[in-house]
Image (tube, helix red, strand yellow):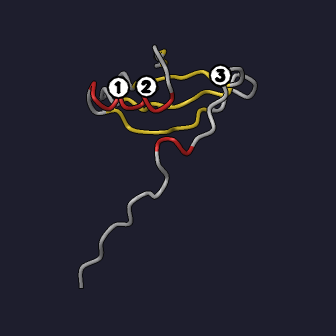
């Protein structure tokens, strides 16, 4: 019997981004170079992951989805 993994049903646009409350960030790993795009809540400091960034095309998709011009980096 073969079991298939269920895909995440949440789309990139499912997060309610508020410019006054959230900051767009790339969380970057120093060790392995992984990058995760998401938003940091400026009041609580909590990071909400939206998507894994594997290449520049993924980053452009993230920016287009949320209407961003630039995204900060946090290590």
Mark 2 to mark 3 CA distance (whole Å): 13 Å
The secondary element bearing badge 2 is classed as helix
Residue 19's disc is 3
Task: Please tell me whether residue 63 is drawn above or below residue 69 in the rendered image.
Answer: below
User: Where is residue 68 shown, x and y percent of the image?
Assistant: 49, 20
Q: Residue at x 38, y 66 (%)?
A: 6
Q: In the image, is 57 to the left or to the right of 47?
A: left
Of residues 17 and 47, which is closer to you in this image?
17
The secondary element bearing badge 3 is classed as loop
Residue under circle 1?
60
Which sits earlier in the primary sequence, circle 2 or circle 3?
Answer: 3
Are circles 1 and 2 on residues that touch, CB within 8 Å? Answer: yes
Of residues 47 and 20, which is closer to you in this image?
20
Q: For label 1, count other residues whose C-alpha is less than 10 Å away and answer few (under 14), some (14-19) or many (20+).
A: some
Q: Residue at x 46, y 26 (%)?
A: 27
Are circles 1 and 3 on residues that touch, CB within 8 Å? Answer: no
The secondary element bearing badge 1 is classed as helix
Mark 1 to mark 2 CA distance (whole Å): 5 Å
User: Where is residue 40 shown, x and y percent of the image?
Assistant: 61, 27
Q: In the image, is 18 to the left or to the right of 37?
A: right
Task: Please tell me whether residue 70 is drawn above or below residue 46 in the rendered image.
Answer: above
User: Where is residue 45 shown, x and y percent of the image?
Assistant: 68, 26
Q: Residue at x 49, y 52 (%)?
A: 10
Residue under circle 2?
63
Q: For label 3, count other residues whose C-alpha is less than 10 Å away and answer few (under 14), some (14-19) or many (20+).
A: few
């Amino acid at each position: 019997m073969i079991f298939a993994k269920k895909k995440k049903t949440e789309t990139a646009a499912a997060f309610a981004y508020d410019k006054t409350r959230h900051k767009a960030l790339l969380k970057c790993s120093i060790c392995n170079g992984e990058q995760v795009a998401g938003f940091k809540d400026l009041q609580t400091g909590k990071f909400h992951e939206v998507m894994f960034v594997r290449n520049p095309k993924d980053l452009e998709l993230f920016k287009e989805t949320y209407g961003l011009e630039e995204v900060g980096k946090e290590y």
